[in-house]
Image: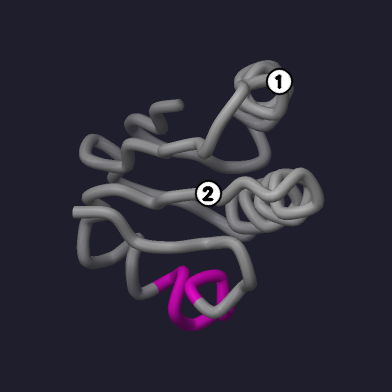
Amino acid sequence: MRCEGEEDAATQALRRAAISRAMKAPGDVVVDLTRLQFADSSLTFDLAILAQRLRKDGRRLFLSDAQPQVEKLFEIVGLNRQPGIQYAG
């Protein structure tokens, strides 16, 4: 899964389709955050829910290559401490 540009409440409907596909993946899910410049709490909420559902199936969510401002948001809201979420690269 890839997040690019700005992810906020306005892009949530588009993101939900990708999250739905990610939940059907057979293994762990990697979210490429390389090109994500801005995120709000709606993204952190969606990623936390995705991680929770993956964890129930014994899978993990990997967050990859977040920009410093996005990584800071995840730290502030505690997303990086959620069970089933790990940083990759």
* Image-quadrant location for residue 6: top left
Residue in the image at 67% along x and 40% along y = 9
Q: What type of secondary structure mainly makes up the magenta span?
A: helix
Residue 89 vs 54, above or below: the answer is below
> Which secondary structure lies at badge 1?
loop
According to the picture, the residue beneath numbered tag 1 turns out to be 24
Give x and y (percent) for residue 34. Answer: 22, 40
Q: Which residues are magenta?
A: 73-80
Residue in the image at 49% along x and 82% along y = 76
Left or right: 77 with respect to 51?
A: left
> Which secondary structure lies at badge 2?
strand
In the image, residue 77 lies in the stretch drawn in magenta = yes
Q: Residue furthest front?
A: 58
Observer-nearest of 85 and 7: 85
Task: Say how the picture is coloured.
Answer: one colour
Residue 61's disc number:
2
